[in-house]
Protein backbone atom coordinates (compact mmCIF):
# COMPACT_ATOMS: atom_id res chain seq x y z
CA UNK A 1 0.00 0.00 0.00
CA UNK A 2 2.78 2.44 0.94
CA UNK A 3 4.53 1.55 -2.31
CA UNK A 4 1.45 2.57 -4.34
CA UNK A 5 1.12 5.84 -2.45
CA UNK A 6 4.79 6.69 -3.01
CA UNK A 7 4.51 5.76 -6.68
CA UNK A 8 1.40 7.92 -7.07
CA UNK A 9 3.04 10.82 -5.24
CA UNK A 10 6.18 10.51 -7.38
CA UNK A 11 4.10 10.47 -10.57
CA UNK A 12 2.23 13.55 -9.37
CA UNK A 13 5.46 15.45 -8.61
CA UNK A 14 6.98 14.53 -12.00
CA UNK A 15 3.78 15.59 -13.81
CA UNK A 16 3.67 18.85 -11.86
CA UNK A 17 7.31 19.65 -12.66
CA UNK A 18 6.82 18.84 -16.35
CA UNK A 19 3.64 20.91 -16.52
CA UNK A 20 5.11 23.96 -14.79
CA UNK A 21 8.36 23.64 -16.75
CA UNK A 22 6.63 23.41 -20.12
CA UNK A 23 4.31 26.33 -19.26
CA UNK A 24 7.31 28.45 -18.24
CA UNK A 25 9.15 27.55 -21.45
CA UNK A 26 6.16 28.43 -23.61
CA UNK A 27 5.56 31.75 -21.80
CA UNK A 28 9.24 32.68 -21.99
CA UNK A 29 9.26 32.01 -25.72
CA UNK A 30 5.82 33.41 -26.57
CA UNK A 31 7.34 36.66 -27.89
CA UNK A 32 9.21 34.63 -30.50
CA UNK A 33 6.05 32.99 -31.75
CA UNK A 34 5.14 34.40 -35.09
CA UNK A 35 8.83 34.50 -35.97
CA UNK A 36 8.87 38.12 -37.18
CA UNK A 37 12.29 39.70 -36.80
CA UNK A 38 13.91 42.94 -37.83
CA UNK A 39 17.53 42.54 -36.81
CA UNK A 40 17.63 41.66 -33.10
CA UNK A 41 14.07 42.93 -32.60
CA UNK A 42 11.18 40.41 -32.55
CA UNK A 43 7.42 40.77 -32.68
CA UNK A 44 4.33 38.76 -33.41
CA UNK A 45 1.24 39.81 -35.29
CA UNK A 46 -0.80 37.98 -32.67
CA UNK A 47 0.08 40.39 -29.81
CA UNK A 48 -3.10 42.29 -28.99
CA UNK A 49 -5.11 40.21 -31.45
CA UNK A 50 -8.06 37.86 -30.96
CA UNK A 51 -5.94 35.29 -32.88
CA UNK A 52 -3.32 35.13 -30.09
CA UNK A 53 -2.57 31.68 -28.69
CA UNK A 54 -3.21 30.97 -25.02
CA UNK A 55 0.54 31.30 -24.36
CA UNK A 56 0.79 34.71 -26.03
CA UNK A 57 -2.29 35.88 -24.12
CA UNK A 58 -0.81 34.58 -20.86
CA UNK A 59 2.52 36.32 -21.54
CA UNK A 60 0.78 39.61 -22.29
CA UNK A 61 -1.37 39.24 -19.16
CA UNK A 62 1.69 38.55 -16.98
CA UNK A 63 4.27 40.89 -18.50
CA UNK A 64 2.53 43.33 -20.84
CA UNK A 65 1.15 45.68 -18.23
CA UNK A 66 -1.16 48.24 -19.85
CA UNK A 67 -0.52 46.75 -23.29
CA UNK A 68 -2.64 48.24 -26.05
CA UNK A 69 -4.61 46.59 -28.82
CA UNK A 70 -2.86 45.60 -32.05
CA UNK A 71 -4.79 48.30 -33.93
CA UNK A 72 -3.06 50.97 -31.83
CA UNK A 73 0.46 49.71 -31.14
CA UNK A 74 3.04 47.23 -32.35
CA UNK A 75 5.69 46.14 -29.87
CA UNK A 76 9.15 44.89 -30.83
CA UNK A 77 11.32 43.28 -28.14
CA UNK A 78 15.08 42.77 -28.19
CA UNK A 79 16.83 40.57 -25.66
CA UNK A 80 19.92 40.13 -27.84
CA UNK A 81 22.32 42.52 -29.53
CA UNK A 82 22.79 42.71 -33.30
CA UNK A 83 25.33 39.87 -33.08
CA UNK A 84 22.83 37.54 -31.37
CA UNK A 85 24.35 37.70 -27.87
CA UNK A 86 22.11 38.12 -24.81
CA UNK A 87 21.86 41.67 -23.48
CA UNK A 88 23.74 42.11 -20.20
CA UNK A 89 23.89 44.97 -17.73
CA UNK A 90 27.62 44.30 -17.48
CA UNK A 91 28.02 45.80 -20.96
CA UNK A 92 27.54 49.13 -22.72
CA UNK A 93 25.51 49.06 -25.93
CA UNK A 94 25.22 51.67 -28.65
CA UNK A 95 21.86 52.00 -30.39
CA UNK A 96 21.97 53.74 -33.76
CA UNK A 97 18.74 54.42 -35.58
CA UNK A 98 16.31 56.77 -37.19
CA UNK A 99 12.90 57.83 -35.87
CA UNK A 100 10.52 54.86 -35.92
CA UNK A 101 7.73 54.86 -38.52
CA UNK A 102 4.89 55.77 -36.20
CA UNK A 103 2.88 58.74 -35.02
CA UNK A 104 4.73 58.40 -31.69
CA UNK A 105 7.39 55.93 -30.52
CA UNK A 106 9.54 54.99 -27.56
CA UNK A 107 12.29 52.56 -26.60
CA UNK A 108 12.37 51.35 -22.98
CA UNK A 109 14.70 49.08 -21.00
CA UNK A 110 13.08 46.49 -18.71
CA UNK A 111 14.46 44.35 -15.89
CA UNK A 112 14.04 40.54 -15.92
CA UNK A 113 10.77 40.94 -13.97
CA UNK A 114 9.40 43.03 -16.90
CA UNK A 115 9.25 46.19 -14.80
CA UNK A 116 11.09 49.46 -15.34
CA UNK A 117 14.65 49.54 -14.04
CA UNK A 118 14.86 51.84 -11.00
CA UNK A 119 17.67 54.39 -11.32
CA UNK A 120 18.78 57.63 -9.66
CA UNK A 121 18.50 59.59 -12.91
CA UNK A 122 14.83 58.56 -13.28
CA UNK A 123 15.37 57.88 -16.99
CA UNK A 124 13.24 55.03 -18.30
CA UNK A 125 13.01 55.49 -22.05
CA UNK A 126 13.95 57.49 -25.08
CA UNK A 127 11.07 58.69 -27.17
CA UNK A 128 10.13 60.69 -30.21
CA UNK A 129 9.62 63.80 -28.10
CA UNK A 130 12.72 63.47 -25.89
CA UNK A 131 15.43 61.90 -28.06
CA UNK A 132 18.37 64.12 -29.00
CA UNK A 133 18.97 63.82 -32.73
CA UNK A 134 22.05 64.05 -34.91
CA UNK A 135 22.17 66.66 -37.71
CA UNK A 136 20.85 64.11 -40.24
CA UNK A 137 17.81 63.29 -38.03
CA UNK A 138 19.18 59.95 -36.79
CA UNK A 139 19.89 59.24 -33.14
CA UNK A 140 22.52 57.49 -31.06
CA UNK A 141 21.66 56.16 -27.61
CA UNK A 142 23.67 54.26 -25.03
CA UNK A 143 22.33 51.49 -22.82
CA UNK A 144 24.66 51.09 -19.87
CA UNK A 145 24.88 50.98 -16.09
CA UNK A 146 27.19 54.01 -16.35
CA UNK A 147 25.93 57.49 -17.24
CA UNK A 148 26.46 58.71 -20.80
CA UNK A 149 25.96 62.17 -22.25
CA UNK A 150 23.09 62.52 -24.68
CA UNK A 151 20.57 59.69 -25.03
CA UNK A 152 21.08 57.14 -22.26
CA UNK A 153 19.03 54.23 -20.91
CA UNK A 154 20.33 53.09 -17.51
CA UNK A 155 20.44 49.37 -16.68
CA UNK A 156 21.67 47.44 -13.63
CA UNK A 157 25.23 46.17 -13.68
CA UNK A 158 25.37 42.39 -13.99
CA UNK A 159 21.65 41.96 -14.64
CA UNK A 160 19.98 40.82 -17.86
CA UNK A 161 17.49 43.20 -19.46
CA UNK A 162 15.49 43.60 -22.63
CA UNK A 163 14.47 46.53 -24.76
CA UNK A 164 10.96 47.25 -26.02
CA UNK A 165 10.32 49.50 -29.01
CA UNK A 166 6.74 50.73 -29.23
CA UNK A 167 5.20 51.95 -32.44
CA UNK A 168 2.06 53.93 -31.47
CA UNK A 169 -0.19 54.31 -34.51
CA UNK A 170 2.45 52.83 -36.81
CA UNK A 171 2.61 53.57 -40.51
CA UNK A 172 0.60 51.19 -42.70
CA UNK A 173 3.87 49.69 -43.98
CA UNK A 174 4.61 48.36 -40.48
CA UNK A 175 1.25 46.61 -40.33
CA UNK A 176 1.73 45.24 -43.84
CA UNK A 177 5.17 43.74 -43.13
CA UNK A 178 6.60 44.16 -39.62
CA UNK A 179 9.83 42.43 -40.70
CA UNK A 180 10.66 45.50 -42.80
CA UNK A 181 10.40 47.88 -39.84
CA UNK A 182 13.57 49.92 -39.49
CA UNK A 183 14.77 49.62 -35.89
CA UNK A 184 18.04 50.65 -34.25
CA UNK A 185 21.08 48.43 -34.39
CA UNK A 186 22.30 47.28 -30.98
CA UNK A 187 26.09 47.12 -30.87
CA UNK A 188 28.07 45.98 -27.85
CA UNK A 189 30.74 48.60 -27.12
CA UNK A 190 32.41 47.15 -24.02
CA UNK A 191 31.83 44.91 -20.98
CA UNK A 192 33.10 44.86 -17.41
Image: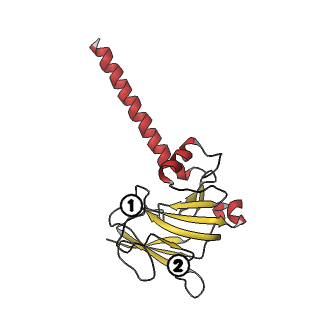
Residue 113, x across and y down, in percent: 40, 55
Q: Secondary structure at mark 2?
A: loop
Q: Can I make out residue 82 in this image?
A: no
Does 140 sit left or right of 3 as displayed?
Answer: right
Quadrant housing residue 67:
bottom right
Q: How many marks?
A: 2
Furthest toward the top, the residue is 1
Quadrant housing residue 137:
bottom right
* As drawn, 150 above or below 155: below
Per the rendering, the mark at residue 160 is 1
The residue depicted at 56 percent of the width and 46 percent of the height is 57
The residue identified by callout 2 is 131
Q: Secondary structure at mark 1?
A: loop
Residue 70, x across and y down, in percent: 64, 56
Give the quadrant of the C terminus.
bottom left
Residue 164, x across and y down, in percent: 51, 63
Per the rendering, the mark at residue 132 is none
Closer mark to the observer between disc 2 and disc 1: 2
Amino acid sequence: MLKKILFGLSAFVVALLLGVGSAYFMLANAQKSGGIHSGPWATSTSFGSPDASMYVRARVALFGLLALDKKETIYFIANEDSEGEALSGSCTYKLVGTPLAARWWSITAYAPDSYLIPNEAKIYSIAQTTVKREEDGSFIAYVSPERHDGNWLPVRAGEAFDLTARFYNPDASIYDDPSKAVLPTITKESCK
